[in-house]
Amino acid sequence: MQNPVFGIRNRQPDYVPDFGTITSRSASIANIFLFGKEAKEIGEGAKESGFPSNRIFFNNDISAPQITADQIRKVCQSEEVLLMKASRKVQLERVLDMFTAL
């Protein structure tokens, strides 16, 4: 399996669909994990650009980082690279804490 990507919305609204387009064109991206309500636009941009919708995972509830950690755990292999990006508001480190808690 190829490398998964974890995307979170950038503060610049016009950047969001572009990120989805860019990720859909990268052959090395296996999955996209989105965390937070505003991240949905990234997934929509990726789908519109041809990224398979069954490889886009979305959790809009930032109070439930365990959901995203479980999504990652179910899909990713132990040797894969996971790129994580988020605003401070989302507190992405909570997902990482849940993911590594085992």
Image: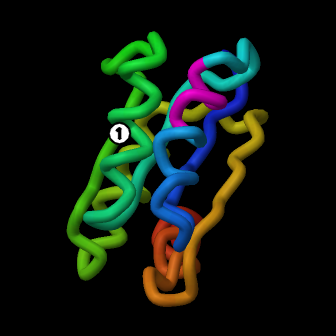
Image quadrant where residue 66 sits: bottom left
Count every numbered label the image shows and give the total: 1
Is residue 25 located in the magenta-colored stretch of the structure? Answer: no
Q: Position of residue 57 (x, y in %)?
A: 35, 39
Image quadrant where residue 76 sits: top right
Q: Position of residue 47 (x, y in %)?
A: 38, 22
Q: Name the foreground residue: 61 vs 39.
A: 39
Report the side of 100 relative to 46 (left or right): right
Q: Look at the image and name its color scheme.
A: rainbow
**Residue visible at 64% across and 63% down in the picture:** 85
**Residue visible at 46% across and 61% down in the picture:** 13
Q: Residue furthest front?
A: 14
Q: Main secondary structure of the magenta part?
A: helix
Report the side of 81 relative to 29 (left or right): right
Q: Position of residue 42 (x, y in %)?
A: 43, 44
Compared with 7, 55 (above or below) is above
Residue holding disc 1? 57
**Quadrant in the picture for the N terminus:** top right
**Residue visible at 48% across and 80% down in the picture:** 94
Tell me which amino acid carries mark 1: Phe
Q: Name the foreground residue: 3 vs 73.
A: 3
**Element on which disc 1 rests:** strand
Q: Position of residue 44 (x, y in %)?
A: 33, 34
Report the side of 22 relative to 46 (left or right): right
Structural crowding at the residue carrying mark 1, measured as other residues with C-alpha within 10 Å and reported as few (<14), some (14–19) or many (≥20)? some
Task: Give the residues in magenta.
Answer: 20-24
Compared with 64, 45 (above or below) is above
Compared with 8, 40 (above or below) is above
